[in-house]
Image (spheres, rainbow, N blue to C red):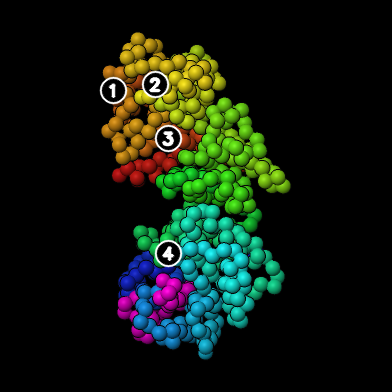
Amino acid sequence: MNPKPSICVATHHASIQDLLNDAEFRSLANREGFLVELRLDFFNDLSDETLQQALAVFAPNALVTFRHPLEGGKQPDVTDAERLRYLQRAANHGVKYIDIEARTPRDGFDKRGAKLILSYHDFEKVPDEATLYSKIWQPMQAQPGVDVVKIALMPKSVDDTSIALSLYSGCNDNSVRASTLILCMGETGLWTRVLAGFFGAPFTYARGEGAPGTAPGQPTWRELDELYRFRDIDKSWNVYGVIGNPIGHSLSPLMHNSAFAELGLPCVYIPFKVEGKVWGFFQDVGQYILQGASITIPHKESIITGCHEVDPVAQAIGAVNTLKHFDYADEGYTGSNTDAPAAADCLESALGTLKDKHVLILGAGGAARAVAVGVKERGARVSMLNRTRERAEALAEELGATVVSHDDLSALRIDAIVNTTPIGMYPNVDASPLEENQIPKGCLVFDTVYNPLRTRLLELAEKRGCKTVEGLEMFIGQGVRQFELWTGKAAPRELMRRVVLDALKKRQK
């Protein structure tokens, strides 16, 4: 059985003295499952004496490198021989890893008891597959004394990250002597960092809490350790993710990973920033690693064309927000929509029943369509109000709803209002799709916006004596349904709600 992968936390300090005064890094020095990368080229006070001071603290779990200036090094005037001299001192002291670029001559270097990482960095591009495999990776892993081949590349899009899958598939050969770690930098390459252990790499890189990191896209060590459970991930785990653009703000990874951990499930959930055609991503990357996925803006409509099966609700809406891999042989996904039943659940919970209730939906986009389908399925009557009446009329005709204007509101008996527009979403927190006097007294008001938690619309509704429902409930509801669809287990709803609520409160401070 292979040992668990480690988390290597990169130092960002301008001096060794700063590093030695950093309580966070000192606490990591002897922590099981962690490495500390000493970037000697960062230190402006580097000398034999100060290096000795650092090694006295960090040596047992240290990864030491003196990066070449052509591969991100910060000291262009230092010669290869001088860089190698410092690395030899580190090896003599008994560090765990020494990292030397493939371009750096290693004549006379003795790694002693350390493991040797041979590395290659390209901060501009990803080479083609043939070049990477035959001209970079193969010559590196064939060199004597090399324990780990590390390759770090800069993808222009998530499609470029498929090179990691190609390279890892070529490493599963008994003749390969060195372990391989391939990292794609930037937001689109996050999955290669989180899944390094999944592919058998001995470690991945992280940054300190609040630190800038030493390469684009490095998560914090705490995120890797606590959110993604990186050190436990192996090939037996199921991988899920959220697909969208933008995606960095998503709270779905926090919600789902917390739920997986609570139930002790060998599953991990990762954000994937996909800018181009979504099925291009699935053909190159997704189908090989994803057991299921959440789909968000702007891919909910386009994803439907690639599904092998689509459930009736998703077909009626014309949008899919959930994929489940049902047959690896056919590389098939079923497409579902959990937004619609989640919205209906929220309203039904507050009203007792939706049968014969009159629901007014604000907006005429994809979210409005999902809510309308969800509530009509449970017997509600739907009206629609939108700033562009023509859009509302087109959608209403398609769904069997009616269109109303602001002037009609005072004369209508409305049981519930649902805002599906982004009006009132952070940062425009003072905006509302309705004025206070336009909200019928006594009706239920549900805002699908959940950042901020209490929108201006909900505040105005409370002044009118209306019962309100926050958008957070729909977000949790659709996530609960996704979790149960993927795992077949009851979701820990209250835990999911608590962790998302805590995160939102922190963001809003």
- Contact, CB < 8 Å: mark 2 with mark 3? no
Magenta-colored span: 43-72
Task: Label 3: state its secondary structure.
Answer: helix
CA gap, disc 4 to disc 1? Answer: 48 Å
Which residue is depicted at the point 58% across and 34% down? 336
- Mark 4 lies on residue: 215
Q: Nearer the viewer, mark 4 or mark 2?
A: 2
CA gap, disc 2 to disc 1? Answer: 18 Å
Q: Position of residue 5 (x, y in %)?
A: 56, 64
Look at label 2 and name its amino acid: Arg
- Mark 1 lies on residue: 435
Left or right: 26 in relation to 204: left
- Mark 2 lies on residue: 389
Q: Is residue 93 above or below residue 488?
A: below
Q: Nearer the viewer, mark 2 or mark 1?
A: 2
Look at label 1 and name its amino acid: Glu
